[in-house]
Image (cartoon, rainbow, N blue to C red):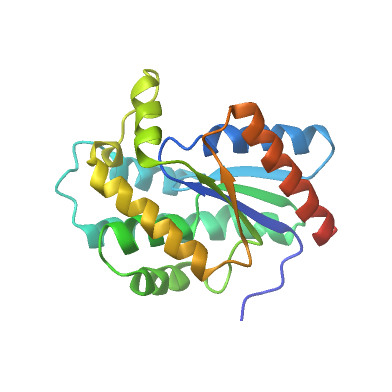
Amino acid sequence: MAAKKAGCFITVEGADGSGKSTVISLLYDYLHDRGWNVLLTREPGGIEIAEKIRTIILNPEHTQMDKRTEALLYAAARSQHFAERVLPALQAGKVVLCDRFIDSSLAYQGYARGLGIDEVYAINRFAVGDYMPDLTLFFDVRPEVGLARINANKGREINRLDLEDIRFHQQVQEGYRLVRERFPERFVTIDAEQSLEQVFEVARTILEERLQEFRI
């Protein structure tokens, strides 16, 4: 059984180009400016070991990477990141904002790569135990819109997953739909095709309401 945590674990999910990374940074600034004890982190990455694994996973030269290797590397990075950074922050009573978590692996590797959602879930339960987010904000955007945003952002680094065709990204979207149906109690879907300002306001409102419920 997982040890009791004192903080609140909030994750953001969404397809590439959904704008979630930009919005979570704005949410962090908003909470921090209002005195919340908050930690912003990301997956894969967030700590030295996990960032090195991230480099391996997302290197566009690693096109021959087996899908099982990919899933296991994500889980390994997640395990170290959670043990070293996320769990201590939760036990210290912090609000943890994490850009991606287990749900990404379920959608990308479990469904889009065809490994099976249950199978990938089992790997990640081994990696982090019984811990799951208290709240997950899903930034919903059509794959073609997300990819168009990526292509228009000339300053964005192109990683290995960006090289996948539109069908792969459509499969990711379907995978997320199945994951949301599996965990409806913690998922809140946000229309990410709105303006950045609108998306932030919706996310901020949801976040503040949920934090009041948890009474952090």
- Residue 84 or 7: which is nearer the viewer? 7
Left or right for 119, reference 26: left
- Residue 80 image offset from top left, x and y in percent: 48, 57
The quarter in which the C terminus is drawn is bottom right
- Residue 43 image offset from top left, x and y in percent: 47, 48
- Residue at coordinates 47% horizontally, 59% vertically from top-left? 103
Task: Using the rendered image of the protein, determine whether residue 202 is visible from the camera's viewpoint.
Answer: yes
Left or right for 198, reference 208: left
Left or right for 100, reference 27: left
The quarter in which the N terminus is drawn is bottom right
- Residue at coordinates 52% horizontally, 73% vertically from top-left? 129
- Residue at coordinates 42% horizontally, 43% vertically from top-left? 51
From the viewer's perspective, is residue 194 above or below residue 121? above
From the viewer's perspective, is residue 196 above or below residue 11? above
- Residue 63 image offset from top left, x and y in percent: 17, 43
- Residue 1 or 176: which is nearer the viewer? 176
Q: Which residue reaches farthest left?
A: 64
**In the figure, residue 69 lies in which quadrant?**
bottom left
Task: Using the rendered image of the protein, determine whether residue 74 is visible from the camera's viewpoint.
Answer: no
From the viewer's perspective, is residue 32 above or below residue 122? above
